[in-house]
Image (cartoon, helix red, strand yellow):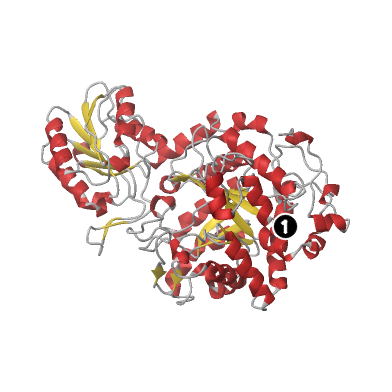
């Protein structure tokens, strides 16, 4: 691949070139430059977006509104040709871009796109080459990813592993939120990604929510608004941010990947869920992603993604959003179980969406939109609105001028000491102690022996060696899965006899009877029992036998490193619940939003593992 710094020309569409309206007349910035609307130099030549749109064919316009994933680790990779061929009828990622005149691509780990940051950088630059080749769309790509931090992170280490949004929410710290956005944005920009489908602005007000949970920053509209805006500010120093999932996916009991959720609350309740999105709009968010959910208070008949009342009436007209609207992935079962590809594509555009994201059948999607234009269901002027909005955004972000990223910067940015320190600080500050009977925590490194057990889904094997490294005498009993078997429970109870304390990692135990039974059996041994609630923060309401419950909001290495520091008394437990914890019956509040125990008498006595008394 040629040196991206030497690429000095960016080609417009062949039709635009024929009209003499060359984007090549725009001198691109040096590769690696951070592009933001605010950083565009005064007097920089501006592409004539209106003339570009007028010169585009109908296929090119629809292609510009089509953003989808590709299979492979480089632009010309044929190792996943069978997958590309089955979905798109061509062999390589570059050929997918060129066949459909794509406006954007979407990266996933499962599609072979995100093996490591250097590879991602090469893929991004290669796909931009494909877009600007003679047989490509002639317009640089939006390169997109879901890199939320925590549970949803498509690129792993050496990219910085963050503890997740609910961990961030437990800090209630806007400075850390802004720093998290800066970490995400700068690392994505280094890899040639220019859109992050983040942050999640859903209020997780339903403890039974199967899809949001710790992806949310909490349940309080004011806190999520403030943290969300700060995270957006950090992200948009480098890339476009995307607020999701509008108008709020936090109070559903159905995962829209597998069904069509419906929320029946009134307009006053909806206003709380809208508040973080309004804050994001007021802060200048580039994009908003729709939710495949039916919101009865606005449109009881159609999900937000397909509803003109939601996307045009509410988002555009009432809330004043003039940026890019993208659907959530259209291959989710909330969509595919209820509408054909042609129907959903046409309806999403009619509703007000600018982007058709990850259609399960791109050929059918394009055919459906073309037929709708032919029969007058959609006007070409409606497409022009979206294409204009997309191209103006690409110009403002500097993507039209120079879409390339210098591969030499990847190693300096990814997982830098400053970024790792930010992640560790968020994790430390998130540690939320929701029970500590008889001051069971902290334990004493160098003195206490600890048995580590728990639901396999919570990865207790990540926690055990870190406790050992801190000086605890650690033994383990492990089993895969979410629901501990009776045999595993018996082994753990027997092993507890020789330990000074037991640490159990739970994983949404509030809905898992087998975990509840195992915790109670361990409590009945009389040994101090510490539960680390490694997923949603509600487990304390079904574990009365636990002496201490510490919420970590994740089971990544960065979360568990902070757990060890909290268990050992190296840090105080400063996190506060970003959600309210209901009673097990769900009819009352057990622990209010903002609750959290501190270790008393801080700072602790050096070397003791116990706070001073």
Residue 495: image quadrant is top left
Q: Position of residue 611 (x, y in %)?
A: 29, 31
The residue located at (66%, 29%) in the rendering is: 408
Residue 186: image quadrant is top right
Q: Is residue 239 left or right of residue 468?
A: right
Residue at mark 1: 391
The residue located at (82%, 62%) in the rendering is: 51
Do we see residue 404 in this rendering? yes
In the displayed image of the protein, which residue is found farthest to the right? 20
The residue located at (74%, 52%) in the rendering is: 139
Q: Position of residue 10 (x, y in %)?
A: 79, 46
Determine whether 18 is above or below 155 in the image. Answer: below
Element at label 1: helix
Q: Which residue is more in the foreground, 569 or 563? A: 563
Do we see residue 602 in this rendering? no
Q: Position of residue 438 (x, y in %)?
A: 18, 38
Q: Which residue is more in the foreground, 346 or 402? A: 346
Quarter of the image where the C terminus is located = top left
The residue located at (51%, 32%) in the rendering is: 158
Q: Position of residue 330 (x, y in %)?
A: 52, 61
């Amino acid at each position: 691949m040629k040196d991206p710094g030497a690429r000095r020309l960016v080609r417009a569409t062949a039709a635009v070139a024929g009209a003499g309206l060359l984007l090549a007349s725009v001198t691109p910035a040096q590769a690696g430059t951070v592009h933001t609307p605010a950083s565009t130099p005064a007097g920089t030549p501006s592409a004539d977006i209106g003339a570009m749109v007028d010169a585009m064919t109908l296929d090119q316009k629809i292609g510009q509104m089509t953003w989808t994933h590709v299979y492979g680790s480089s632009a010309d990779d044929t190792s996943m040709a069978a997958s590309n061929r089955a979905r798109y009828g061509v062999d390589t990622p570059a050929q997918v871009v060129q066949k459909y005149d794509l406006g954007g691509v979407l990266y996933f780990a499962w599609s072979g796109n995100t093996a490591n940051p250097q590879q991602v950088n090469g893929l991004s630059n290669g796909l931009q080459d494909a877009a600007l080749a003679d047989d490509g769309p002639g317009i640089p790509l939006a390169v997109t990813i879901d890199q939320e931090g925590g549970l949803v992170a498509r690129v792993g280490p050496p990219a910085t592993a963050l503890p997740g949004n609910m961990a961030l929410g437990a800090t209630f710290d806007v400075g850390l939120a802004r720093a998290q956005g800066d970490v995400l944005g700068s690392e994505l920009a280094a890899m040639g990604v220019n859109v992050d489908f983040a942050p999640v602005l859903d209020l997780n007000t339903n403890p039974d929510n199967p899809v949001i949970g710790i992806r949310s920053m909490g349940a309080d509209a004011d806190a999520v608004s403030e943290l969300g805006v700060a995270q957006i500010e950090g992200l948009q120093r480098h890339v476009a941010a995307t607020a999701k999932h509008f108008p709020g996916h936090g109070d559903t009991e159905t995962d829209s990947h597998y069904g069509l959720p419906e929320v029946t609350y009134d307009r006053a309740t909806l206003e709380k869920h809208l508040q973080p999105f309004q804050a994001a709009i007021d802060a200048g968010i580039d994009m908003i992603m729709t939710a495949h959910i039916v919101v009865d208070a606005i449109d009881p008949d159609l999900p937000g993604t397909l509803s003109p009342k939601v996307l045009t009436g509410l988002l555009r007209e009432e809330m004043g959003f003039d940026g890019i609207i993208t659907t959530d992935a259209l291959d989710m079962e909330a969509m595919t179980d209820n509408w054909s590809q042609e129907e959903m594509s046409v309806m999403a555009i009619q509703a007000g969406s600018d982007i058709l994201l990850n259609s399960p059948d791109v050929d059918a999607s394009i055919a459906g939109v073309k037929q709708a234009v032919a029969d007058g269901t959609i006007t070409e002027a409606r497409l022009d609105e979206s294409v204009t909005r997309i191209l103006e955004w690409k110009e403002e972000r500097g993507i039209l001028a120079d879409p390339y990223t210098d591969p030499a910067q990847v190693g300096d940015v990814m997982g830098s000491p400053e970024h790792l320190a930010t992640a560790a600080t968020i994790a430390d500050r998130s540690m939320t102690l929701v029970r500590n009977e008889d001051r069971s925590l902290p334990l004493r490194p160098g003195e206490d022996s600890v048995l580590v057990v728990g639901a396999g889904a919570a990865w207790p094997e990540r926690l055990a060696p870190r406790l050992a490294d801190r000086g605890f005498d650690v033994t383990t009993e492990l089993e895969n899965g979410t629901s501990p078997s009776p045999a595993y429970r018996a082994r753990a109870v027997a092993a507890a006899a020789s330990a000074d304390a037991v640490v159990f990692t739970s994983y949404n135990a509030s809905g898992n009877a087998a975990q509840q039974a195992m915790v109670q059996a361990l409590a009945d041994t009389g040994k101090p029992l510490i539960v680390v609630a490694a997923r949603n923060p509600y487990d304390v309401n079904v574990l009365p036998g636990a002496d201490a419950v510490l919420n970590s909001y994740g089971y990544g290495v960065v979360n568990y490193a902070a757990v060890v520091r909290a268990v050992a008394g190296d840090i105080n437990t400063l996190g506060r619940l970003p959600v309210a914890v209901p009673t097990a019956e769900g009819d009352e509040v057990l622990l209010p939003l903002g609750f959290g125990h501190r270790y008393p008498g801080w700072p602790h006595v050096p070397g003791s593992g116990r706070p001073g008394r």
